Amino acid sequence: MTKHPTIKLVCFDLDLTLISHNSWFDLNMALGVSPEEDKRLYTEYKTGKITYEEWNALTLEKYLEHADATRDGVTKALSKYTYSDGAREAVQYLQGKGYAIALISGSIDIIVNRIAKELGIPYAKANNTFLFDENDRLNGIATDGDDCMAKARHLEAFCDLLGIHMSECACIGDGENDLEMFRRTGKGITFTGSRIEAEAWKVIDSLHDIPKMFA
C-alpha cells in the first residue's frame, strides 16, 4: 500500500466528526444547563460579549449546582456517544496505510482520552481538562483558551514531536474551531453542508469517503 505523497499525519475532530454527538451539549443537558442557556452562552461568546474563559466559568457555575457534578456523573454523561458512520473504518484504514493519526478536540479530556483509547489513536489532545477534588467533585476546568487557535497549537506540537511540517497534515472536521488548522495545513477536509465547506481543501459526504480519498 502507498500513502498520499504529501501527507504524513491525519488529524480528526471529535464532535460531529468521529462521534455523531456534541459532547458539550450532552454534558450541559445532564448537568442542569438548559438548551436556552446553552444557546445564550454560545451566542455571547461568538459575539465577543464574553471570553472563552468566561464562557467556561459561567458553565462551571451551573454544573456545580448539580448533584451529578462528580467524576462519575461527568463520565456517565459523556459516555452516551455513538460513533459517526464509517468512523472506526476510516481510522483503521488510515492506520493500515501507515499514516500517523491524531485526535484534537475542543471537548473534554475524559471523552477525548476514552475515544482515543477505543480507536487506538496515539496522539490525542482535548482543549479542556476537568479538575476534581479529593471527593471526586468537579471543582474546575483548565482550558487552553479559544478552541480555534488552541487546536492549531496542539497540532503544531504533534508535528514537532513527529518531526514533520504542518503542510504534511490533513485535518478532518466540521466546525469553525477547525479553521485555523485548515488554514495552516492547507488540507482541511469537511462534510457536505458544513458551515466551513467554503474553507475546505476537500469535501466529503461521510467518513466512508476517506478510503477513496487516501487510496
Image (cartoon, rainbow, N blue to C red):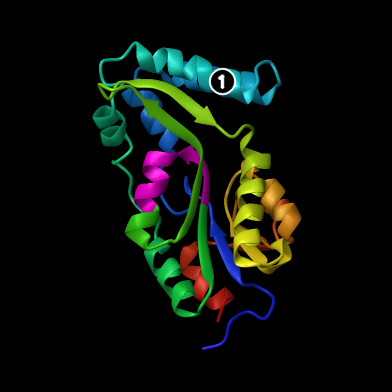
Rendered residue at 41%/64% (across/down): 86
Q: Would you say 160 lies left or right of 132 here?
A: right
Residue 79 visible at all: yes
Residue 41 on the magenta segment: no
- Spot occupied by residue 48 in the image (x, y as percentages of width and height): 71, 20
User: Is 95 in front, or is 29?
Assistant: 95
Q: Is residue 56 above or below residue 20?
A: above
Residue 196 position within the rendered picture, expressed as x and y whole percent measured from the top left: 67, 48
Q: Magenta stretch: residue 105 in it?
A: yes
Q: Is residue 192 above or below residue 130?
A: below
Q: Which residue is mark 1?
A: 55
- Judge from the rendering whether residue 70 lies leftward or rightward of residue 164; answer left or right: left
Q: Position of residue 113 (x, y in %)?
A: 39, 48
Q: How many marks?
A: 1
Image x and y of residue 191, in percent: 57, 56
Q: Is residue 191 visible to us here?
A: no
* Residue bounds of the magenta highlight: 104-115
- Residue lying at the far bottom in this picture: please name it: 1
Quarter in which the C terminus is drawn = bottom right
| Secondary structure found at label 1 | helix
- Residue ID at (50%, 35%): 128
Question: What residue do we see at 65% from left, 17% from top?
Answer: 50
User: In this image, 107 relative to 51: left or right?
Assistant: left
Q: Nearer the viewer, residue 139 or 114?
A: 139
Q: Is residue 13 above or below residue 2?
A: above
